[in-house]
Image: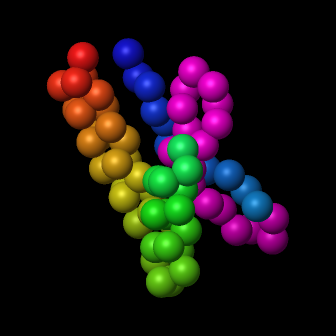
Amino acid sequence: MKRFSVVLVDVGAGERIPLLCDVSTGLGAFEPTAFALQLRARGRAVNTLVQALRAVQLAHTALGAACR
């Protein structure tokens, strides 16, 4: 079952920020969000942030399944 999802949030003036959200609660995960904002501060594009968060999503899924 899918536990996390990457969601694009419109924060105004056309700016979009991707968040890694927990599907069960709908809340964003803190550490991946801080990671994405750090990449954004370095001037990375939104699609780059989306791909980075998808890699984090895959790691959470793989490690979560391994720990069960």
Q: Specify the quadrant that holds the N terminus.
A: top left
Asked if 22 appears above or below 54 in the picture, the reply is above
Instruction: Answer whether residue 47 is visible to the viewer in this image.
Output: no
Residue 44 appears at what percent x and percent y? 46, 77
Q: Is residue 54 left or right of residue 49?
A: left
Instruction: Answer whether residue 55 is visible to the viewer in this image.
Output: yes
Give the residues drawn in magenta, as a range.
12-28
Q: Specify the quadrant that holds the C terminus.
A: top left
Asked if 51 appears above or below 1 in the picture, the reply is below
Residue furthest bottom as drawn = 42
Q: Quadrant of residue 21?
A: top right
Q: Is residue 11 left or right of residue 26?
A: right
User: Along the line of sight, which residue is nearer the eye, 28 or 18?
Assistant: 28
Asked if 64 appears above or below 34 in the picture, the reply is above
Q: Identify the residue at image location x=34%, y=48%.
A: 56
Q: Quadrant of residue 66?
A: top left
Q: Quadrant of residue 3?
A: top left
Residue 11 appears at what percent x and percent y? 76, 61
Q: Is residue 27 magenta?
A: yes
Q: Is residue 16 magenta?
A: yes
Residue 59 appears at what percent x and percent y? 27, 42
Residue 32 appears at what percent x and percent y? 47, 53
Residue furthest left as drawn = 66
